[in-house]
Each structure stands twice: as structure tokens, then as C-alpha cells.
Image (spheres, grey):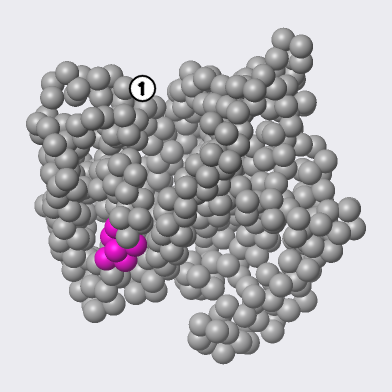
Amino acid sequence: MSESSALASSGSFLGKAGPLVLARLFTAGLTLSIPLVLARVLSLEEYGTYYQLFLIATTLQYVLPFGVVQSLYYFLPRAEQKRPYLGQTMLFVTMAGLVGAGLVAALLGPVSGLFSNPALLQFRWPLAIYTALLIGGFPLEVSLTSQGRTRHSAVVYLVSDTLRALAMVVPCLLGTSLNGMMVAVCLFTGLRYLAAWAVALKGSTGPLMDGRLLKEQLVYAAPFGAAMALSIPQQNAHFYVVASAVAPALYALYRVGCFQLPVVDLLYTPTSEVLMVRLGELEKAGRLEEAVVAFREAAGKLAFVFLPVSAFLFAAAPEFVSALFGAKFLPAVPIFRVSVLGVVLAILPMDGVLRARGHTRAIFVSYLIKAVVTAPLVWWGVQRFGMKGGIVSWAVAELVGKATLLARVPAALSTPEQPLRIRDVIPWPELGKAALAAVAAAVGIFALRAGTVSAWVRLPEGFVWRVLPLAVAGLLFVIGYVAVLYATGIRPLRVLAGIRSRGAA
């Protein structure tokens, strides 16, 4: 392919990806708004029950499809007849949804006892129906994107997430509480399920199912499904253990403490994907020795965003929690401060490097080690230290998982002529300057709070006045962070320009 053709192809690809990026940005805002609104209109007990219901459903949603839905990204672009893959995927997730509904119906009683929350039992059948339809409609956007219909997929993302937000928020605003919400989300997921079947049957040819193709699809999906079967329960283990140890009202505080802004997903994923493409290009061109430079560059740019985000949220945690959720959730601040430290662990895009270099076994081993470490650690931490033990145990398990990945990165980036060690792949100058600026700006917020705490207490009620302390803290932090960066020779606008180009890619 000529250079002009390659550029045209790249431009065409970016043009197709653009609508999806914009749709995900918009839907991230919608998803962010749901818990904020519900925190205002539900009691602490209802809010904790809401989180427990959806914790159960989403765990089953990501584990039971066993990677079959994600396999469409591989098979559909290569398939002459797409209907068998779409049809058998829909049949598979329909059966998986029925299994999920059966698990909910059979086990919600014991789970409600484990969570010390008998209120869960009144939602047994709505939750079972919702789980079945949620899993059954899982392929909707994936089936469109994997066929190259990205604009259609973007529209579906927008419409679907808007309807989901309305289904979850409007009933509660109208006073019907969780009962009305569960009825509404069942209707919503029913529409998604019908739409997923419509996409599977429309515009494609061939039989609805092919035994040989299904076997190939299952073989391809199995490793990813096994990884999800380890990863999702491990990631959610602290939620389950804490829910089993505290009352629903305290669990509501814990979930607010674990709240995360979507900044990591919005920046880490595209950066990791661009890095994977770059490493593939370097390997093809016989210039793999430059791979470590590309990794350090990507990690350095993420450091200039993730370190200040983590430092700001840590320092301004009381203002942030009060502004977004209300003063009744201020006891969640210590948990929130631990959870935001997890943002720092996303600075190094290690999984992208290992996938690009074919070291996928290291990723599976990382999930396995995290799962083995998490179970006893979280149980002991919650038993010994309560909710704080739960979040600290999660952070330690994440640190262990990242360390196992980091141990494999030097080998993935090494060449026979250039063996690397861990210290060779880390962007020390960028980390040092970003950390210095972030810590200095955070100290300014602590100093501001010490001098203005009495003034903030006397502010009138209302959203604007509640947000004012957070806005002032944010402005002070940005000024301090940028000033220190300039003093160290870093130009923030250049860093942002580099991050934007990666995000667009």
C-alpha cells in the first residue's frame, strides 16, 4: 500500500471511529449522572439495595456470556455469511440469560441473608427478568460495530443509554422508588433484547446456526471467557464481602466511597490501543528497539493527567463527595481517598504492550494471582478493619496484579541487542515532575480548607453553594499544578495536544 493510500485508509478508519468516541463520551456523562441523582432521592437503605441488585446482575452479565459476544469482533469482519455468527450468539446469550435468571431466582434468598438485607427478596422476579434480558441484549452494539456499522452503533449507544438513564431515574423522581425502577428497567432491557434479534436477522444471509462455526466461535471465546470468569468476580469481591458484613445503609456509603470518574477509561483505553498499533508497526519495520521509547512516551503523557486527577480527588475529597452526593455521604470520604489512589495504577499501559507482543499468558496469570490474593485478603481486611479494610484490600490486590504485569513488560519490549530491566521502561522524569506538581497543588487545597472551613459551613443551602467549595478548590489546584509544571520546564498545552491526538486515534 502506498503512503497516500495508507493515510486515506487511516483517515477512513478514524472517520468511522469518531461517532463511537463521541457517543461514548456522551453516554459516560449519562452513566455518571444516574448514581448522583439516585443518591438525592433514595434513602441510604434504598441506595444500598439498589447497588446490591445491580451488582448481582452486572456480575452475571459479564461472566455468563463467556466471551462469545466479544468474539464477533474477530469473526464477523472475516465471514462471508454473517447470520450464523449473529444467530448463534443470540441463542447462546439467550440461554446464558435464562441461566442467570435461574441463578437469581434460586440464590437471591441466600444472598439476601448473606447481605443481611431481606428487602432484596421483594425484587426476586424483577431482578431475574432483568438479568435474563440484560444478558440477552448484550450483543446489540457489538453486532453493529463488528459489521462496520459504527454510525448505527453510535446511535444505538446514545438512544439506549438515554433510555436506561430515564428508566432508572424517572420512576424514583416520581416517588415509585426501587419498585418502579425495576419495572422500568425490565421494559427497557426487553426492548434491547428485541432490537438485538432484529439486528441479527436483518440484512444477513445463511442459516441461523452452524454447528461447525459455533465450535470455532466457542474455542476462540473460551480463553477470554475464562479470564472474565476470574477477573470480574475478583474485581467485585470487595463489594460482596462488604455487603455481607454491613447494613445496606453502610453499604451505600461504601459504594459512594468507591465511586470513580470515567477519566481512566476515556484516556487509558485509546492510549493503550494506539500503543498496540505502534508496537505492531515497529515490529513489522524491524525497529522493535524503539518500542520502549513509545511505551515511556505513552506512560509519561498519562502520568501528567492521572497523577493530578488522583491528587486533586484525594485532597478535595470532602468537597467532591458533598457536591456530588450530599453531606449525608461525607462519612465515605476516607474510603474515597483510598479508591482514587487506584487511578495512579493506570499510568503504565502494560496490558496493551503484552497483548501487542503476544504475551497474553502473562495477563491471565495476573488475573489468576489477583484472584488468589483477593479472596483471603478482602475477607481478612473486612473482618479486621471493616469497610476501610475492604477498600485497602482491593487496592493491595490491584497493586499485586499490576506488579505481575510490570515484571513481564521488560521482556516484551526487549530485543537480543537491547535487554531491558524494569527501571528502563518507566518514564522517571515525567513521573517525577507530574508527582511534584500534583503534590504541591494538593497541599494548597489542604491549606485552603484549613483557612476557610468556617466560611464553608455558613454557606446557604442549594446546588450552586454546595459546588462552590469544589470549584474554588479545583481552580486553586489547576493554577498550582500548571505553575509548578512550568517551573520544571513542562508545557501543559503540548502534553494535552499529545493526549488529544492519542484519544482521537
Residue drawn at 82 percent across, 48 percent down:
433
Residue drawn at 20 percent across, 19 percent down:
215
Does the stretch in magenta take in 162? yes
Does the stretch in magenta take in 73? no
**Disc 1 residue crowd, few under 14, some 14–19, many 20+, Cα 10 Å:** some
Q: Position of residue 485 (x, y in %)?
A: 83, 57
In this rendering, would 123 be left or right of 329?
left
Q: Which quadrant holds residue 110? A: top left
Residue drawn at 77 percent across, 26 percent down:
423
Magenta-drawn segment: 156-163
In this rendering, would 329 be left or right of 86?
right
In this rendering, would 363 be left or right of 80?
right
Q: Position of residue 257 (x, y in %)?
A: 50, 56
Please identify the residue farthest to the left as the structure is shown.
207
Q: How many marks?
A: 1
Q: Position of residue 40 (x, y in %)?
A: 39, 74
Above or below, 167 relative to 190:
below
Above or below, 177 relative to 414:
below
Above or below, 270 relative to 1:
below
Q: Main secondary structure of the magenta part?
A: helix
Please identify the residue farthest to the top as the structure is shown.
416
Of 218 and 211, nearer the camera is 211
Q: Which residue is mark 1?
A: 223
Residue drawn at 52 percent across, 20 percent down:
358
Q: Position of residue 87 (x, y in %)?
A: 15, 36
Q: Quick check: can you spot residue 463?
A: yes
